[in-house]
Image (spheres, rainbow, N blue to C red):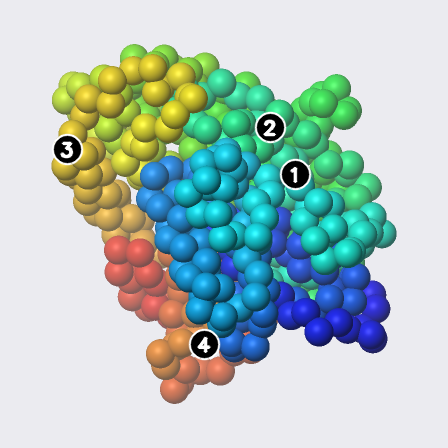
Amino acid sequence: MKTKGLRNEKVNIVTLGCSKNLVDSENILTQLRGNDIQATHESEKQDYNIVIINTCGFIENAKQESIDTILQYAEAKEQGIIEKVYVTGCLSERYKDDLEREIPNVDAYFGTRDLPLLLKKFKADYKHELVGERLLTTPRHYAYLKIAEGCDRPCAFCAIPLMRGKHVSFEMDTLVGQARQWAKNGTKELILIAQDLTYYGLDIYKKRNLSELMARLADVEGIDWIRLQYAYPAGFPLDIIDAMKQYPNICNYLDMPLQHGSTEMLKRMRRGITRDKTEELVDKIRQKLPEIAIRTTLIAGHPEETEAEFEEMYQFVEKMRFERLGIFTYSHEDNTHSFTMPDNVPEEVKQERADTIMELQQGISDELNAAKVDKTFKVLFDRKEGGYFIGRTEHDSPEVDNEVLVDASKYYVSVGSFAQVRITSTAEFDLFGEVVD
């Protein structure tokens, strides 16, 4: 990658939303630098004159955060603090016309597939040879590997297909090459992401091919952990679990959003699965791999959700005892199927239901964590903070799951490296331990 002849333009990229957006920002960063343009991500300095905002449009709170950020930088432009503001990402893809009308002093808006057009604003070309050289904004020891874009699922509540388009799998050779490149530079953990991992390969290989991709990535020298985020339960290919069992560097971890525990609600949500089938799937996975940690996500307050259906979801969580769980309150998204239904669960009821589920999960997590006392785990350390080295077990993804804290006054570990840690005490969502030789 070139490093000389940099222009006077200096760009700061601001990322909102999920890890998939972060990958897109890393691609923007890579292309700009590959075109001799100075660019940073989430710069703490005020030495840039151009801002690119990569927006999220997933739910109402995320949309509002994106709008507030656009307004903040548009005002900075008005005050002469910066010269140009460009907006890209999901919100811009979905509401470009509205945004251009309401916030006209943004220099240009781009959709999720408009990177070449964005680059033209800098008189830059999209360089295909840089695809396998993506610069990371995460700590060097872990990286998000996006294996597909878009989604073909018909979920009633979800606007992602409107923003990301149809499912498109990325070529396996390209993904493996990228993993090799990162491993040479010190990356130890790959986090596989997509709107739906289990659909991988259907479009280009005419079969569900995630397990083969996992196997090929597991053979990359230097990659110690591979974890899966965002699997879909309907039609779930169990050979994924077989691959986890076969390869020791594939984490016993699965992020599989289930959305609800009531069959009637799942039908309204167009999830293509019943509660009984869901429970059967989870049981099969746990029977095949008892060591697995399953993370799931639920929605509270979808249109027409009754107290009885919410109680079913509560009982579902109580019965399944998921190792990790998060819950959203329903967001009424225009142009989705759910938008045709009345948004008839009051906001305070949505929040109360979500809080009730999280209180239940807190107790479950507390009990599961307590059972880990005196056990030893391989831990990857992400950072040092507040007198502790902070890391994760194979059962935990960055930023969303439990963390392992080791007292930095008693033990030393190298950030970005592994250590064996014996758990000495626990809290609802944290583990405390000591390093063992």
**x, y percent for residue 86:** 57, 53
**x, y percent for residue 161:** 53, 27
Q: Which mark is residue 384?
A: 4
Q: Amino acid at mark 3?
A: Val
Are there few (<14), some (14-19), or many (20+) residues within 10 Å of tag 4? some
Count of numbered circles on the image: 4
Q: Which mark is residue 113?
A: 1
Measured Cα–Cα span from mark 2 to mark 4? 39 Å
> Which of marks 3 and 2 precedes in the sequence?
2
- Examine the image and state in which quarter residue 30 appears: bottom right
> Which of marks 4 and 3 precedes in the sequence?
3
- Name the side, left or right, on which 327 lies relative to 187: left
- Name the side, left or right, on which 160 lies relative to 185: left
**x, y percent for residue 402:** 38, 56
Q: Dot 4 lies on which element?
A: strand
**Is mark 1 in CB contact (under 8 Å) with mark 2?**
yes
Q: Amino acid at mark 4?
A: Lys
Q: Residue furthest bottom?
A: 409
Q: Which residue is mark 3?
A: 349
Give the residue at x 62% y 66%.
11
Q: Which residue is mark 2?
A: 165
